[in-house]
Amino acid sequence: MSTAENRAVPEHVAIIMDGNGRWASARGLPRTFGHRKGVEAVRETVRAAAEVGIRYLTLFAFSSENWRRPESEINDLFGLLKTFIRRDLAELHRENVRIRIIGDRSTLRDDIRSLLLEAEETTRDNTGLTVVIAFNYGARDEIARAAARLAGEVAAGRLQAGQIDAQMIDENLDTADIPDPDLIIRTSGEERLSNFLLWQAAYSELMFVPELWPDFSREVFFAALERFSARDRRFGGLSATAVALGS
Ligand code: FPP
């Protein structure tokens, strides 16, 4: 059995769940089957993350660019999120999981908005794994909304432009009280961030795995965590070895 025991477990793992469509196409199935199977991979990944003591797991479920997809696929993705919250919320709550949503909710339908709010409210005081669902999320949009909020403060005379620093921008992002991801995993072999957590990814380790999202299993996840634990994170400083050697 593959486990991540005795390894440095990242506090926050963020995942770009890519490859649902290709998974379905490879089997001659409609794309929607790939998304459905993708939800099963979400369940397995949430369980595995809680098991190894990860504190935050962020999942990119719907990007602000996904509106360019056919309406039927958009409806399907919204439907899957709704079903996931309706069916799994009670169990997630029992498992002490806290749910947070990031992304722009202002343009979402009322039924989706209230469901997202219900998931957050129900699990607000839970102390286990925090699952952050990025929904209608785009990093540039998130940064622009933070900038607009700060500009509003300046215009209202409550803030001087010169006082704005990185921490202030950080505090106005959707992820305000969430630590930056230590590890960002993207499935399906694509190697880009696609407008995901651009600000927060400044020092994240990036990992690209070939498996399509529906094939992402606890074994693949734990193998990625093992690879992460071998990485040397320097945050702009020197490696521990270099410090020890005085080089
Ligand atoms: C990327 O595959 C995946 C998505 C755009 C959506 C991910 C959504 C889910 C797994 C289901 C809902 C999520 C939750 C949290 C319940 P793609 O369609 O871009 O695949 P392709 O690149 O092969 O076409």
Image (tube, rainbow, N blue to C red):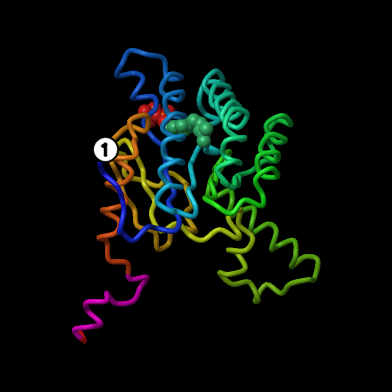
Q: On the rendered image, what quadrant is the N terminus found in? A: top left
Between 228 and 161, which is closer to the camera in this rendering? 228
> Residue at position x 33%, y 12% from top?
28
> Residue at position x 40%, y 43% from top?
48
Determine whether, in the image, residue 158 is placed left or right of residue 69.
right
Vertical placement of 185 versus 233: above or below?
Answer: above
The verdict on residue 237 being magenta is yes
State the SS at label 1: loop
Q: Report the span colored magenta.
A: 234-245
Can you identify the residue that label 1 sits on? 210
- Residue 123, how many percent across, how many down? 65, 45
Determine whether, in the image, residue 80 is placed left or right of residue 108.
left
Quadrant in the rendering for residue 30: top left
> Residue at position x 52%, y 29% from top?
68
- Badge 1 crowding class, 10 Å Cα cut-off, few under 14, some 14 to 19, many 20 or more, is some
Q: Looking at the picture, which amino acid does disc 1 mark?
A: Pro
Residue at the top extreme, as displayed: 28
Between 86 and 135, which is closer to the camera in this rendering? 86
- Residue 161, how many percent across, how many down? 67, 72
The verdict on residue 200 being magenta is no
Q: On the rendered image, what quadrant is the C terminus found in? A: bottom left
Vertical placement of 32 versus 57: above or below?
Answer: above
